[in-house]
Amino acid sequence: MLNLPRWQTIVIIAITVLSGVFALPNLLPSAVLDHLPGWYQQSRINLGLDLRGGAHFLLEADLRSVLSERLTNLSDSVRGELRKQQVAYKDIMVDQGRAVTVVLRDEAQRAKAIEAIRNVDPSLAVSGQGDTIHLAYSDQDLFRRKREVIDQSIEILRRRVDETGTIEPTIVRQGDERILLQVPGIKDTTDLKNKINQTAKLTFHLVNEDVAAAGPSATVPPTTAMVPTREGMQELRRSNPKAWEEIQAANPRMSPDQICRRYQPQCLPVFKRVIVGGEDLDDARSTFEQQQGGRPIISFTFNAPGGRAFCAATRANVGKRLAIQLDNEIISAPVVQSAICGGSGIITGTFTTQQTQEQALLLRSGALPATLTIIEERTVGADLGADAIRDGTVATIVGTILVALFMFAAYGPVFGGFANLAMLVNLLMVFAGMSILGASLTLPGMAGLVLTVGMAVDSNVLIYERVREEKALGRSAFSSLATGYERAMSAIIDANLTTLIAGVLLFGFGSGPIRGFATTLSLGLVTSMFSSTIFTRMLLSVWVRWRRPTELVI
Amino acid sequence: MLWKPVHLFTFKKKFDFLGQRKAALILSTLINVVALLGVAFVGLNFGIDFRGGIAIQARAKQGVAQLDELRSTVGGLGVGEVALQEFGDPSTALIRVQRQDGGPQCVAGAQKVMLTRAGPGWQVKPGPPGTGDVEFTSPAALDAIAWRDAVSRAGLTVQERQLPRGTVNTAKIDMTPEQQAEWCQQVAIKLVEDAIGARYEIRGTEAVGPKIGGELMESGILAVIATMAAIAIYVWFRFEWQFAVGALIAMLHDVISTVGIFVLFQLDFSLTALAAVLTVAGYSINDTVVIFDRVRENMRRYKKLGLVDLLNLSVNETLARTLMTSATVFVAVLALVLFGGPVLYSFSVAMLWGVIVGAYSSIWIACAGLVYLNLRPEQLRPDDDKAEKAKA
């Protein structure tokens, strides 16, 4: 039982050494770490926001008003279609919640009315009887729409938060209608919160070609404003970062005119009059041209009033440029090739797919598809995080030393030493495991670590107490060790698994820092099954062969 | 040999643990009833995780934090109930503000924030009753982008369609009362920041809106129930149903009395505290299972022995281990209490209690439960791999 085959010993040692290798980057001082290869430096445990400092926001999208807005649009379209098909109706109303109700003047026209409605949207669920028709979106459709809204919000948030120059924000969907946003290492959240709150303003303007043709020296009439292009601003950011920072920090915000005059990035003269606003833009997507080799293009769709305004403006201005302005930058200024009527159009050019995707995203980011409300906010200053790291580290070290002293006192230098060695190996394995899993270490996680230290030696206590009992029964040294290990196993497994159940459920129900606690606790329990039993058994088997004890001092 | 091991917890005398089961039962019932009454009549000191609200950690830029002064400053902001405590060291204060539910007071607060952050001349007025609408009036006419920037100074999220068209002086932002309540958390944070920002450095801010608080509470209770059920099912699976019931009662006992500790010391009952309660449930079962394991083994070995004697024997045999393990976990948790810092304090204290009560309940509740449930040796499942191997 105690004598392990050589290959098992090798495997156990290999696992231990590997754990050490994976855990090491977390323990080395950065001065040493700098001389090691990059991939090795990378394999460090992520610190949670509570240790690293940063901001955590839980945002909720207001999907209800998205739906009611959509129903209002639907009722408008249905009204138009019924008129076109000459179906008389008494009333069309949007019900509270999730349906549009149409009341017809004449029941006999029901079939015709339903046909007209199918023209508007064939996927609608139609119900009701007599002169009343209820229209609702199918559950599938609503579900898909919800997902779209959240995905789109995430894209927009990512763009906005990244623009602040902060590092690696985590933006993920949480549940059906929520988004978790975590930004590590941020000092002032006011700016970040404003970024979340801000709705980018998208507008379409005609370019004043006369001023543009006259060059930079031209006088700008009052109807026209100079607006920097997006590329121009990005170029400015690269070439003159100080100017960029000044623009960002300015309070009140600088107008585009001011920016153009003061910093002279690439600017375009545009008429101030808004042809159509972002609120009228229904959608924008990156697609491919049907003919001519399938070049990447951007297609967009307006709602009815937007489409009309766009049609009129493009008809009158073929050959001129149309500037698409997002906030205070022009993201694109395509030339109007022909009148764009019917509500949808395309932007062509020598784009790459990546560019069209970005442009489409920019167009869509005109408005967040749903209002995002901050329903939970946790901000930790960096020095508060540093305090937490210090407290957690001190507690872990003191806890480890106290437990080690206890084990030494109770089981002597040999057995106590083996158990303590196992405890250290366990700590290394938890660190290694977290590095490999890419899990975050939080302050409660450190508490879990301390708890694991106390609990990990439990398996050794179980074994050693059993060995004492077997020894008291008059067994030989070797036999007491062997039976001690064997008979303690069932209790060890039960004891660890029950605690593990609590750990796993805690992981499932908990969030943020609590998950960190559940992670270290569960990981520690699992690895302690290796370190406290398999690893110490190997140590003992080597020791027994070496010392050949006739009597156990335990 | 450098030194001899000390047999810390090995006793020659055999205790009649189960003989005390009546006294223990009365004591435990008393503790649990008192704990439950405490929860009902004194109440838990719920942190913002469950109740919603705002917690701000502020450190004095110079000297110590003046709690009384802070209390009157923040209390005078019209943000409702305010609680203050020293946090970690004398220079740091934890300011807790009750959950904001919106309403005219919050709108008045928003006006104050606008005056401080956006300049003089701003007015903020509530919309018609029954809605959460808010009307902003600016000193100068603003266009949509300027409006958006302006209202964001008061922490307000707006959508493009909510913004006024054209360049105007007044903007009516339509909101539901629920949306207004969530926004009001932001208003309150800004109010507090503005009021104390000159002399205090804000080290950390937490805000939990009305909606999420209720949900966290719900999922927390669910987690405790699910954990206990899962562990009981595991024990049932590994042992007999009597063991599972005994373990479940012991867990309930530990969970209730740990909650009682939170009431007694009015410790902050937060998500971390809930983690402590769950860990106590998981840890307390640890000792219980080890004893049960021995009970089962002994039942197979000593078929003639009466149940009480058998339980006494098993408890005594495993006593050294129970005490030793409890001691190691105890000192580890003690290190957390002493050095783990203010954030983990409630958690650590609860765990410290959990270690003690876990050892107690595994003997006097779980084992005594087996007596009352009338466990008999012949009820044991005949087969168990370990028992077979032990004979070999």
Image (spheres, helix red, strand yellow):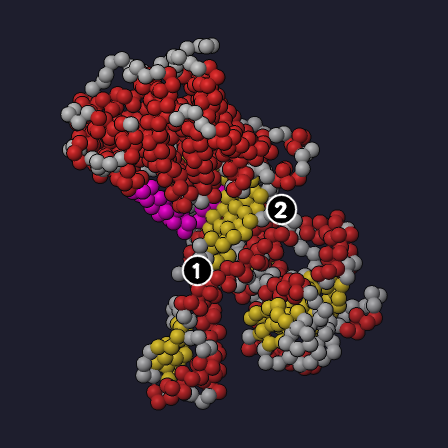
Q: Position of residue A49 (x, y in %)?
A: 54, 41
The image quadrant where one finds the C terminus of chain B is top left
User: Residue at left 24%, top 30%?
Assistant: B296
Quarter occupied by residue B36: top left
Secondary element under disc 1, as helix, strand or loop, is loop
The residue that appears at 45% across and 89% down in the rendered structure is A86
State whether residue B146 appears in this view. Answer: yes
**Considering depth in this image, is A25 or A447 the residue closer to the camera?**
A25
The residue at which mark 1 appears reads as B176
- Whether residue B65 can be seen here: no
Q: Is residue B145 above or below residue A337?
A: above
Residue A300 point in image, percent of width and height: 60, 72
The residue singled out by tag 2 in the image is A167
Residue appearing at x 34%, y 80% in the figure = A132
Please state if A22 lies on the left or on the right of A473 as rendered: right
x, y percentage for residue A397?
51, 25
Kindly identify the residue that appears in the image at 78 percent across and 68 percent down: A220
Membership of B226 in magenta stretch: yes
Of A393 and B377, the residue lying toward us: B377
Asked whether, in this view, residue B115 is left or right of residue B39, the answer is right
Residues rendered magenta in the picture: B206-230
Quarter location, residue B273: top left
Calculate the distance from the C-alpha at mark 2 to the C-alpha at mark 1.
35 Å
Q: Position of residue B205 (x, y in %)?
A: 51, 41
Observer-nearest of B84 and B32: B32
Which secondary structure type mostly characterizes the magenta part of the structure? helix
* Mark 2 crowdedness (10 Å alpha carbons): few <14, some 14-19, many ≥20: few
